[in-house]
Image: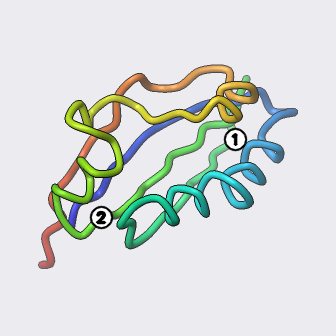
């Protein structure tokens, strides 16, 4: 299993809208278009913004490339998300998950 981890930030007043966008539009669309086995979101209030971390799981590297293309480390940020995010990482990190 592969985990794709990515960070984005909103203004405090946009955090609920971004979370709703993830739940109602982005996660369902990503699931419908890809071989995603899981989609989790972490949310953390900070002094001047709200940080979100998304963790998307895939069964293998082929599924990651199918989702994100050959340049799979590049962030995949839909236009609707760009409208409410104040900043985001340009790349995602990928980890091979190990069971211990």
Q: Determine the residue positioned at 41% across, 58% down.
A: 56
| Horizontal side of residue 12 vs 97, given as left or right | right
Q: Which numbered mark, 1 or 2, is in the foreground of this view?
A: 2
Where residue 67 sits: x, y (%)? 35, 50
Q: Determine the residue positioned at 61% across, 37% down.
A: 51
Where residue 61 sits: x, y (%)? 16, 56
- Label 1 residue SS: strand
Residue picked out by circle 2? 58
Q: Determine the residue positioned at 28% across, 51% down.
A: 66
Q: Nearer the viewer, residue 78 or 46?
A: 78
Where residue 81 sits: x, y (%)? 66, 34
Residue picked out by circle 1? 45
Which quarter of the picture shows residue 37? bottom left
| Horizontal side of residue 72 vs 83, given as left or right | left
Label 1 neighbour load within 10 Å: few <14, some 14-19, many 20+: some
- In the rendered image of this protein, does residue 78 appear above or below residue 98? above
* Label located before the other in sequence (1 or 2): 1
| Horizontal side of residue 32 vs 12, given as left or right | left
Where residue 35 sits: x, y (%)? 35, 66
């Amino acid at each position: 299993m592969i985990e794709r981890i990515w960070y984005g930030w909103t203004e405090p007043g946009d955090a609920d809208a971004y979370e709703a966008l993830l739940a109602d539009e982005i996660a369902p669309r990503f699931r419908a278009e890809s071989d995603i086995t899981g989609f989790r979101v972490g949310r953390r209030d900070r002094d001047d913004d709200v940080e979100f971390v998304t963790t998307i799981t895939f069964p293998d590297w082929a599924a990651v490339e199918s989702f994100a293309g050959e340049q799979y480390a590049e962030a995949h940020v839909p236009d609707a998300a760009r409208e409410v995010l104040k900043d985001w990482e340009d790349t995602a990190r990928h980890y091979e998950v190990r069971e211990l």
